Each structure stands twice: as C-alpha cells, then as structure tokens.
Image (cartoon, helix red, strand yellow):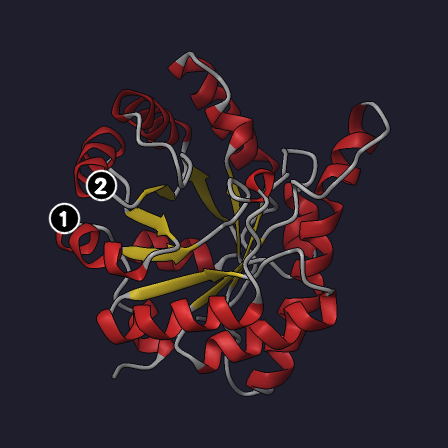
Amino acid sequence: MSSGSSRLAQLPAPLRSALAECRLIKVIAGLTNFDAAAVERISQAAGEGGADLIDVACDPALVRRAAAASGLPICVSAVDPELFPAAVAAGAAMVEIGNYDAFYPLGRRFEADEVLAITRRTRELLPEVVLSVTVPHVLPLDQQEQLALDLVAAGADLIQTEGGTSARPFSPGVLGLIEKAAPTLAATHAISRALAAAAGPEAPAVPVLCASGLSAVTLPLAVAAGAAGVGVGSAVNRLQEPWAMAAVVRELRTALPRPVAATL
C-alpha cells in the first residue's frame, strides 16, 4: 500500500501546489445534493471563480457532469464506503468521508469508532486513492485530536474539520461571521498541531482542510489556525445564479493570504 505522501503526489499538480501553498479552495455542492442541474451550476461557478476542487455527492454521473462543467478535479463525499469505487472509476480524484452536517438535524451522530471503521473499509476498497476524512465536531476537542491521529494511522491522507451547524452566532456583521466559524477554527488549530507534533520536525504533517461555517472574513483565520485549505458550501451553493456563485468564489480566492512557503 502506498503511503499518504505518495498518494498525495498522485493528485494533479495544481491541486498539490494549492495544498503546499495553503491556498486550496474546495467548493462543496453537498453530500446529499443529487440535483444534477444544481451540481452543474455550482461546478461551473467554482471553475469560473478560481476554486481548486469540487466536492460532490458520491454518484458517477455527478462526477462526470461536475468535471465537464468545471474543468477541475472532483472529490466525492459519502459515509458508505461501498459507494466510492464506482465514483473513482468515473473519474473522481479523491474521496471524502463526511462531512456530517446534513445528518445532525436528523439526530444522526457519527462517533469515533464508526468513523474509524468507515475509514478502514474505504482504505481496503481503495488502497491507492487519496482519502480525506472529516472529524465529527460533536466530539470534545481532545477526542477530535486523538481521532485525527487514529485516522491517519488508518490511512487518511487529509483531515477535514467541521462545526458550522453547532455554532450559535449572536452578533451581526463581521463579529457574527467569526462566531459562526469559531468551532471549525478551534478544531483546525487543535488538530493541525497534534498532527504536526506526531509527524515530527523532519516530516510534513498531514494537511488539514477547514470547512463548515466559513466566509471570506474567516478564510484567513483558517489558514492562520493551520489549515492547508478550506471547504466552502452554503456560502456558494445557497445562491441560484451562476454569476453570483462565481463572484463569491472569486471573493473567497481574494480573501486567502498570499502563498506560504511549504512542502508537501
């Protein structure tokens, strides 16, 4: 089986560069969004706006449609490992376990043991494919750190954070946007440092993607907290017009700090 670093080396060069420079933007169409026309609009806007990666529901037809509309690499998201191989065969560059935001309103929680089991099964099915795994934000921060370490040991190549659904912003304007992003920023800070400590001073740490509840205001904070990239969903996909979606993606791109010297 390949190591995490060798699997990441298989990603398209622009995607690797975006991770290395801590400027990766992933536009998330939604794990439960199987509306092909909506996914196509989101993907087209992401490509036009300067995103690096599209994250779509795990369906081969959506993979092909999103790739054609965006010209970008495709990530597929699911919580059922058995769905991944067909999407990879359709052209997905990587797979993502989570995030879990769509499940929380239904009362569905994902605990550490279940996420680990899904990760191990996914790695059995796809030993050579880049795998990102979301750490559930419902866990206390110390348990999120430990789960991230366990996920890397089980074969995860990237770790993603979440937290937007648990945030309860009570202030208007910029302060409210920061309050909205606080849970995922805290997780990114804690997890990125735990992974860096585990990797040691001579090895690159597993990249962390900060997602859920982010905006142009908080993207720079995500990078400062240790993120190699960000995932943005509702800020883009809640809009209807492709030009408006593309404008938001361009705003997000502009909000990120200039490239940071780093090596994957």
**Any part of residue 150 in sight:** yes
Q: Earlier in the sequence, mark 2 or mark 1?
A: 2
**Any part of residue 127 in sight:** no
Q: Amino acid at mark 1?
A: Ala
Question: Quick one: label 2, few (<14), some, or many (20+) residues within 10 Å?
Answer: many
Callout 1: SS: loop
Question: Quick one: label 1, few (<14), some, or many (20+) residues within 10 Å?
Answer: some
Q: Name the residue: 68% across, 72% down.
A: 143
Q: Please state which of residues 70 and 35 is positioned toward the viewer in this rendering.
A: 35
Could you say where residue 50 lies in the image, as x and y percent from the top left?
40, 34
Total marks placed: 2
| Callouts 2 and 1 close, C-beta under 8 Å | yes
Q: Name the residue: 60% across, 51% down.
A: 162
Residue 26 badge: none
Which of the 4 image quadrants contains residue 94? bottom left
Callout 2: SS: helix
Q: Is residue 125 above or below residue 132?
A: below
In the image, farthest residue toward the front: 107
Residue 90 badge: 1
Write down the residue under mark 2: 63
